[in-house]
Image (cartoon, rainbow, N blue to C red):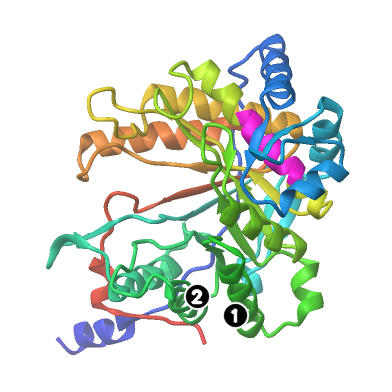
């Protein structure tokens, strides 16, 4: 009896295991022939040259014009000459290290490295005691601690669940405090406007004990910039991306075009549109800060034709992920991939759709697959019944 008590006492405080870097074990899959890949590239450039992207921030217009683009200042629609796009996307680095507060958790994004991250922006949380419910700050903190403990989770990828009981205008501050005090892994922030990015940069400097020069030397934060498909770049997001790039931080350019709603219903048409949105926005970021670290973060998946809800983990998701990965390899830019499932329960459907998403991400063969995978749709707090280790 005494020995069992001793064992329980020794195991009561759980020490986190180090994250082991993973290398891709399989060669990438080229789902398109070389001719089809070239066609996607050419048609993407033609779309940018003849239809263009609509930049809603007036601050972007002089930069675009100074680099050879034609801007309609009445509408913000910008036409990109082919040579301008190809010149600037070539400046995006093909690999970089995302620094964590704990150097043991630094992530090299490039080559054959694969990193798995936490879920991001789930609206609800689920546990065996309280059931399914909207997320709170307490749930958010508990899940950040859980992600810190998991050796399969290489980085914090935003809100594992939305803490809706915190004020929206200061949520980025309370969230950053949680990430920096309850975890020592690399962190993704929400880049909604320049002010939130500046606040996040100041907080990461405090947490990491660094100055401006060290912040600019290597990315310590990453943020996702969603293009408002079709072909619209919102002002708060692109201004936040400019602030990130000028401070040397990583930007994920992530068109999330749901086929049949925000892009053509065919996967081929969606891949072309999303690729154009991605490389056009990355080209602009490189105009602002040449060499700024970027990810291709395209998500191509259809919507349910009955409900209009996004369908994740379906065959079209797999096809789109493989095609997007092939284009990312062409441009030699790291890729961020999202995993997911349409199921609202941890059932067989959730398992096989997540498996399909996972294999698509593995086989897309992008330079670096950074995935959001640990807990989307369903999040558990079971292990938090024990005391978790919190880094200081």
Q: Is residue 181 visible?
A: yes
Snapshot quadrant of residue 77: top right
Badge 2 vs badge 1, beta-carbon distance below 8 Å: yes
Residue 386 location in percent, x, y?
Answer: 27, 78
In front: 146, or 376?
A: 376
> In the image as oriented, which residue stretches furthest toward the front?
74
Q: Determine which residue is flagged by label 1.
A: 203
Q: Can residue 27 be seen in this view?
A: no
Snapshot quadrant of residue 36: top right
Q: Is mark 1 on a helix, strand or loop?
A: helix
The structure residue drawn at horizontal position 70% and vertical position 57%, both measured from the top left corner, is 242
In front: 343, or 226?
A: 226
Magenta portion: prevailing SS class: helix
Would residue 108 be counted in the magenta stretch?
no
> Looking at the picture, does residue 117 appear above or below residue 179?
above
The structure residue drawn at horizontal position 28% and vertical position 22%, both measured from the top left corner, is 305
Q: What stretch is highlighted in magenta?
A: 275-284
> Looking at the picture, does residue 76 appear above or below residue 156?
above
The structure residue drawn at horizontal position 75% and vertical position 24%, both measured from the top left corner, is 49
Residue 378 location in percent, x, y?
Answer: 26, 52
In the rendered image, the quadrant that contains the N terminus is bottom left
Q: Residues within 10 Å of mark 1 (few under 14, many from 20)?
A: some
Would residue 184 be found to the left or right of residue 215 on screen? Answer: left
> Looking at the picture, does residue 206 appear above or below residue 120?
below
Q: Earlier in the sequence, mark 2 or mark 1?
A: 2
Q: What element carries label 2?
A: helix
Q: Determine which residue is flagged by label 2.
A: 176
Would residue 202 be found to the left or right of residue 121 on screen? Answer: right
């Amino acid at each position: 009896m005494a020995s069992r008590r001793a064992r329980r006492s020794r195991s009561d405080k759980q020490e986190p295991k180090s994250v082991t870097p993973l290398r891709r074990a399989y060669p990438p899959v080229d789902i398109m022939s070389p001719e089809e890949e070239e066609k996607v590239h050419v048609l993407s450039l033609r779309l940018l040259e003849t239809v263009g992207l609509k930049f809603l921030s007036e601050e972007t217009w002089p930069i675009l014009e100074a680099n050879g683009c034609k801007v309609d200042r009445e509408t913000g629609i910008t036409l990109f000459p082919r040579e301008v796009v190809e010149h600037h996307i070539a400046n995006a680095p093909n690999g970089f290290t995302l620094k964590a507060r704990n150097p043991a958790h630094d992530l090299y994004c490039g080559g054959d490295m694969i990193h798995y991250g936490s879920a991001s922006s789930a609206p609800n949380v689920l546990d065996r005691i309280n059931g399914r419910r909207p997320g709170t700050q307490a749930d958010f903190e508990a899940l950040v601690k859980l992600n810190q403990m998991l050796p399969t989770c290489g980085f914090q990828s935003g809100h594992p669940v939305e803490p809706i009981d915190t004020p929206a205008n200061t949520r980025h501050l309370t969230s950053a405090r949680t990430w920096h005090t309850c975890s020592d892994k690399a962190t993704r922030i929400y880049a909604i406007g320049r002010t939130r990015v500046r606040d996040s940069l100041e907080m990461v400097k405090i947490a990491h004990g660094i100055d401006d020069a060290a912040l600019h030397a290597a990315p310590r934060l990453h943020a996702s910039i969603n293009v408002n498909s079709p072909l619209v770049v919102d002002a708060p997001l692109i201004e936040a991306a400019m602030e990130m790039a000028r401070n040397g931080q990583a930007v994920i350019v992530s068109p999330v075009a749901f086929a049949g709603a925000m892009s053509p219903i065919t996967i081929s048409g969606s891949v072309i549109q999303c690729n154009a949105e991605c490389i056009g926005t990355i080209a602009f970021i490189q105009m602002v800060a040449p060499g700024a670290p970027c990810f291709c973060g395209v998500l191509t998946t259809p919507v349910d034709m009955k409900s209009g809800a996004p369908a994740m983990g379906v065959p079209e998701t797999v096809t789109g992920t493989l095609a997007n990965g092939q284009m990312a390899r062409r441009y030699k830019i790291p890729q961020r991939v999202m995993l997911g499932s349409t199921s609202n329960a941890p059932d067989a459907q959730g398992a096989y759709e997540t498996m399909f998403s996972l294999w698509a991400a593995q086989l897309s063969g992008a330079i670096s697959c950074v995935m959001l995978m640990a807990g989307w749709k369903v999040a558990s707090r079971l292990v938090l019944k024990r005391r978790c280790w919190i880094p200081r």
